[in-house]
Amino acid sequence: MIADKLRVAILQAAISGQLTEQLPEDGTATDLLNQIAKEKTALVKDGKLKKQKPLPPVTEEEKPFNIPKNWEWVRISSIGSVVSGGTPKTSESSYWNGTVAWVTPADLGRLKDRYISNGLRSITEAGLAASSARLMPAGSVIMSSRAPIGYVAIALNALSTNQGCKSLVPTLPAMSEYIYYALLARSRALSEKGSGTTFKEVSGKVFASFLVPLPPFPEQGRIVAKLDKLMPLIDQLVELERERERI
């Protein structure tokens, strides 16, 4: 469909700096990374975050396309904390139908917009404690890592996921909207990194080291504002194409 190709092209233009102007007063992505590093250090000091292992530098060979000079290619875990999900024992009734929102890739696939507050099922506090699922704050960016790879959403409230999702809790919560669009734009590239025989899956390690382009914070806002205007128009085009196919 033309609309799908147009969506891909617009998202690609957005994350390569072609939809917005680069302004000197924005500073650089390096400035932003320094701010994120300081915030992480403070969180570690307060016991709210575990100290991360040093990430390997991004090499020139890894960079998939050119970005503006004041942007940076970064590994996703350098701008937040990567969280994997889990599923409580299904035969234990005390773990289910509780107050903890619990999201699966199927729930992400049913979304009509970018925000998610809950899935079809929920778990209890006991179920959360007895599984590898973790409660994440509002603003966490969730991505399906299998069956299929590439659905993306932003948590509207605190929630957990099953193991079919990999999530990023941004160090700076105000970056959630841009990260959402960046992962959406790079979802095909991430899918290509999936492995497995029954179905392709992206591991937490692969997701953590995955590259996204990082603009200075002010330009992130301009990118999000531009895409917020363009994406609904693409959705309208999708509907027009579907109506045409039904005629």
Image (cartoon, grey):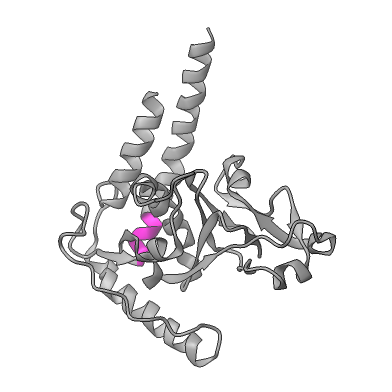
Overall secondary structure of the magenta section: helix
Q: Within the magenta stretch, is there residue 135?
A: no
Horizontal side of 215 relative to 232 (left or right) equals left
Residue 47 x/y as whole percent: 55, 89
- Name the residue at 30% across, 44% down: 12
Vertical arrangement, residue 159 with respect to residue 143, above or below: below
- Closer-to-camera residue (144/69): 144
Horizontal side of 200 relative to 90 (left or right) equals left
- Name the residue at 42% across, 39% down: 230
Residue 129 x/y as whole percent: 71, 73
List the single residue furthest toward the right.
94
List the single residue furthest toward the front.
197
Vertical arrangement, residue 180 with respect to residue 234, above or below: below
Of the 4 image quadrants, the one containing the N terminus is: top left
Horizontal side of 164 relative to 184 (left or right) equals right
- Closer-to-camera residue (169/243): 169
Q: How many labels does the image show?
A: 0
- Name the residue at 37% across, 52% down: 223
Vertical arrangement, residue 41 with respect to residue 114, above or below: below
Horizontal side of 9 relative to 237 (left or right) equals left
- Closer-to-camera residue (54/226): 54
Residue 53 x/y as whole percent: 37, 81
* Residue segment shown in magenta: 217-222
- Name the residue at 28% across, 69% down: 29
List the single residue furthest toward the left.
60
